[in-house]
Amino acid sequence: MNAAETNYLAAVWPHSLTSAMAERRTGVKSSEPRKSPVRFRKKHLLSVADLTRDEATGLLDRAEAFAPLLEQQIKKLDTLRGRTLINLFFENSTRTQSSFELAGKRMGADVVNMSVKSSSVAKGETLIDTAATLNAMRADLLVVRHGSSGAAELLSQKVDCAVINAGDGKHEHPTQALLDAFTIRARLGDIEGLTIAICGDVLHSRVARSNVALLNILGARVRLIGPPTLMPAGADRWGADVFTDMRKGLDGADVVMMLRVQRERMNGGFFPSAREYFWFYGLDEDKLKHAKPGALVMHPGPMNRGVEIDSSVADNPAVSLIETQVRMGVAVRMAVLEALNGGGEP
Ligand code: NCD
């Protein structure tokens, strides 16, 4: 982690989580599936902490309304007709970028994918210059992924349009957490009271940070499992119980969320070898037996098979929700795009 990133995370994390947890305590739980669009208090979606419990539940309800549409032959709405969505990805991504592209198109928006490698950024343009370009293009919605924590927030201060954080460094990935919650809810019903174990490279994971925050907002009991070298200092103050012994951490868990070992963010030896990592922290059938009988397995992808997860678990449709997560992502992102745009009935 570079110094700027460390400062950013120290400033916004876990204070932002604490305020989200306060919201959770005061938030109203919606009982009826939401038929109308959610309206955000904030212009952007930069962090899960931007959401109240009511807003988060409302988005999941709204995604539930959109999900059947994706199974139909004609999948298009015109809620965002005439709007421009720009996908600005500074890091490689297949599923998140295409998920936002599909969601935007299915809501009727014009979607532009900006390929950063071939853009002016590669020629030395700064993030601020990029913001000026985006303003000139009159974008309405900007989806941004960047390798530095805080990049989405910085852009949001410089552009006129709504910004959605699609992953900023090790900070947050709010729509991943929303689609994970939606996937769990679709399978197990209410999230309140479930025990959810998040396991692996917590240190480098924006998915873990966003999930701990959102699952707390929704009333789950969260555990973090990983080797001490990949567990951030102070993780026990995020709203999760911390375990270094995977078997103990899995004991009684309803859901096991595996995290990718993020080698591209590692600049040293965080564990001796992939083989040893798998021995202690790789999810296989044997370790899964320590969770609750019938426990479900998730992974945000892309997976390192044989490092954090064994194919016998990942590809077992009786336990694995990994494909469902990808499918649910589009409906959840449609709900988010609508909420940031002011909305309209489907
Ligand atoms: C995650 C990401 O990029 O943060 N993946 C994703 O969005 N599908 C997790 C990861 O890369 O490990």
Image (cartoon, rainbow, N blue to C red):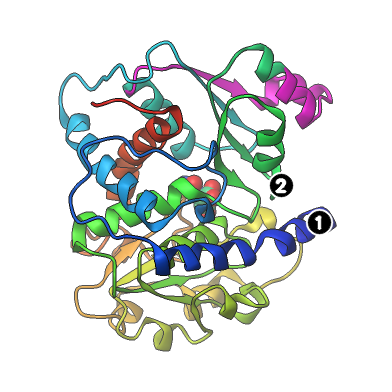
Q: Which residue is mark 1?
A: 2
Q: Secondary structure at mark 1?
A: loop
Query: Compared with residue 86, is residue 59 higher up or lower down, i.e. above or below?
Result: below
**Residues packed near mark 2 inside 10 Å, few (<14), some (14 to 19) or many (20 plus):** some
Q: Position of residue 194 (x, y in %)?
A: 29, 73
| Kind of residue at disc 1 | Asn
Q: Which residue is mark 2?
A: 148
Q: Is residue 158 left or right of residue 140?
A: right
**Residues packed near mark 1 inside 10 Å, few (<14), some (14 to 19) or many (20 plus):** few
| Kind of residue at disc 2 | Ser
Span shown in magenta: 107-132
Q: Nearer the viewer, residue 2 or 9?
A: 9
Q: Is residue 338 left or right of residue 148?
A: left
Residue at 48% across, 43% down = 41
Query: Compared with residue 290, is residue 88 higher up or lower down, i.e. above or below?
Result: above
Q: Residue 44: name its quadrant.
A: top right
Q: Is residue 265 left or right of residue 123?
A: left
Q: Is residue 121 magenta?
A: yes
Q: Position of residue 254 (x, y in %)?
A: 28, 74
Q: Nearer the viewer, residue 98 or 236?
A: 236
Query: Compared with residue 38, is residue 264 higher up or lower down, i.e. above or below?
Result: below
Given contact means CB atoms under 8 Å apart, are the residues at marks 2 and 1 in contact? yes
Residue at 53% across, 56% down = 49
Is ligand 1 closer than 8 angstroms to the Cβ of mark 1? no
Q: Quadrant of the C terminus?
A: top left
Q: Quadrant of the N terminus?
A: bottom right
Q: Is residue 89 left or right of residue 279?
A: right
Q: Secondary structure at mark 2?
A: loop
